[in-house]
Image (cartoon, helix red, strand yellow):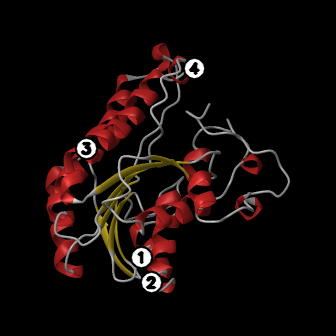
Amino acid sequence: MGSLIGKTLFITGASRGIGLAVALKAAAEGANIVIAAKTAQPHAKLPGTIYTAAQQIEEAGGKALPLQVDIREESQLVAAAQQAADTFGGIDILINNASAIFLSGTLETPMKRFDLMNQVNVRGTFLVSQICLPYLLKAENPHILNFSPPLNLNPRWFKNHTAYTMAKYAMSMTVLGLAAEFADQGVAVNALWPKTVIQTAALAMLGGMVDPKNCRTPQIMADAACAILCRNSREATGNFYIDEEVLCEEGVSDFSPYAVTAGEQLFQDLFID
């Protein structure tokens, strides 16, 4: 198993939620964190900015580079990747965490929402990967990790939110393609998805569809992600990991500390049969 000491992680959407949890976990292990996110000023409904995240990361023991980036804007991403490499000497790991969600039926999905999900989840993931790959190809143990689900073609996962499923599955298809394309060059490309719903600000934006007490904290995704990122990039690629399964492989048997409310039944996440 490798180490994250001195590694540089470029994390999209790392100002809050799972992205920030991964950043803090990696920072505690001695990593440099590039916070590539949009929120530079406090948001009316969402917690955290790139600057509050940077402060937390440095308090956790890592080095932080907060960069205001909209992953839909190619020029911003090119500049951010270059600044990250100039600041830390390269990029070792890319985490495609930024995502847009809108759970609705076809007739209730405004094209504005459809376009946003495809611009962020699909185009954004592909574009950030494309821009970071030249730096990753120079790294010793390079990883791309997408927070996207296993490709489960059970119609139940399309029935109630076809547009969202299409956009998230495209992120997962990127994993399949890039893993195969860059396997010989040693770049690991994997996906990670939670077994249960995770309590984040995004959950609050869904209007009470899931009670937070039936969720786990983002820490389980952070612990699983960092375990994956320490694996040999030439031996662990093209996988669709589930957080609990990864941690079982790491010897974890008690998952109760990850529960938001001890003893409550957990709500299974989407795309997990």
Q: Which numbered disc, 4 or 1, marks the residue closer to the eye?
A: 4
The amino acid beneath tag 1 is Ala
Q: Amino acid at mark 4?
A: Arg
Q: Regarding mark 2 in the picture, which secondary structure is present there?
A: helix
Which of pointers 3 and 1 lies earlier in the amino acid sequence?
1
Residue that carries the numbered disc 4 in the rendered image: 156
Residue 58's mark? 2
Which residue occupies 43% across, 83% down? 30
> Picture coordinates of residue 121 (x, y %)?
35, 41
In the rendered image of this protein, does residue 124 appear above or below residue 184? above
- Asked if marks 4 and 2 touch (Cβ < 8 Å), the reply is no
Tell me the distance, in whole angstroms, between the alpha carbons under discs 3 and 2. 36 Å
Of the residues shown, which amino acid type is indicated by label 3?
A: Ala
Local secondary structure at mark 1: helix
Give the residue at mark 1.
54
Q: Are marks 3 and 1 in contact (CB under 8 Å)?
A: no
Q: Which mark is residue 180?
A: 3
Crowding around mark 3 (Cα neighbors within 10 Å: few <14, some 14 to 19, many 20+) is some
In front of the other: 213 or 191:
191
Reading the chain from its start, which is encountered first: label 4 or label 2? Answer: 2
Q: N-terminal of the two: label 3 or label 2?
A: 2
Q: Is residue 204 left or right of residue 99?
A: right
Find out whether the residues at labels 2 and 1 contact each other: C-beta distance under 8 Å. yes
Instruction: Where is residue 204? Give x, y as percent.
Output: 62, 46
| Label pair 4/3, CB-CB below 8 angstroms | no
Q: Residues under labels 4 and 1: Cα distance?
A: 40 Å
Tell me the CA gap for discs 2 and 1.
Answer: 6 Å
